[in-house]
Image: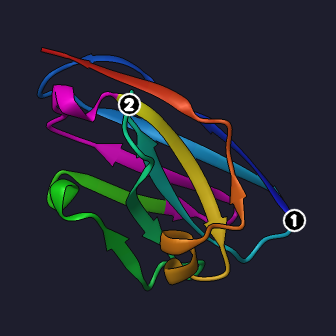
Amino acid sequence: QVQLVESGGGLVQAGGSLRLSCAASGRAGYAMGWFRQAPGKEREFVAAMSWSGGTTAYTDSVKGRFTISRENGKNTVYLQMNSLRPEETAVYYCAAGVSVAVVQSTPRSWGQGTQVTVSS
């Protein structure tokens, strides 16, 4: 079992940047990633990275603007978000699983979420 704690959310103007962090405690070795859920919408996959960092996945709408990275020594994954758009206002959740594919489909663990608000 792994526990996930997100941080780094906040208010930013459209076109701005934020970096989210997710610290994992407990068992190491998981792929980790990010989802988001906007008001009235379903939770959607954003990005994921394998434990080794060799495999990444992004949803199409964030490619070229968001970058996922990790520091395994700190058991932490990051999401650098650039050129943010108002429609990306959402609660962003960290997730973990045994592989990137599992993170995308049925994550094993979830964080509590961090709010990102992008003003126009």
Magenta part of the protein: which range? 70-89
For this rendering, which residue is in front, 41 or 103?
Answer: 41
Task: Name which residue type carries label 1.
Answer: Gln
Q: Quadrant of residue 59?
A: bottom left
The amino acid marked with disc number 2 is Gly
Q: Is residue 59 magenta?
A: no
Q: Is residue 8 visible?
A: no
Q: 10 Å neighbourhood of mark 1: few (<14), some, or many (≥20)?
A: few
Find disc 2 in the rendering and name its residue. Answer: 40
* Residue 95 location, quadrant: bottom right
Spatial separation of the CA atoms under disc 1 and disc 2: 30 Å
- The residue most toward the front is 40
Residue 46 placement (x, y as % from top left): 36, 56
Which residue: 34% across, 32% down?
A: 18
For the point 87% across and 65% down, the residue is 1
| Side (left or right) of 90 relative to 75 | left
Q: Is residue 63 visible?
A: yes
Q: Is residue 88 magenta?
A: yes
Examine the rendered structure and indicate whether residue 68 appears above or below residue 43: below
Q: Is residue 39 left or right of residue 92?
A: left
Total marks in image: 2
Circles 1 and 2 in contact, beta carbons < 8 Å: no
Front position in the image: 53 or 111: 111
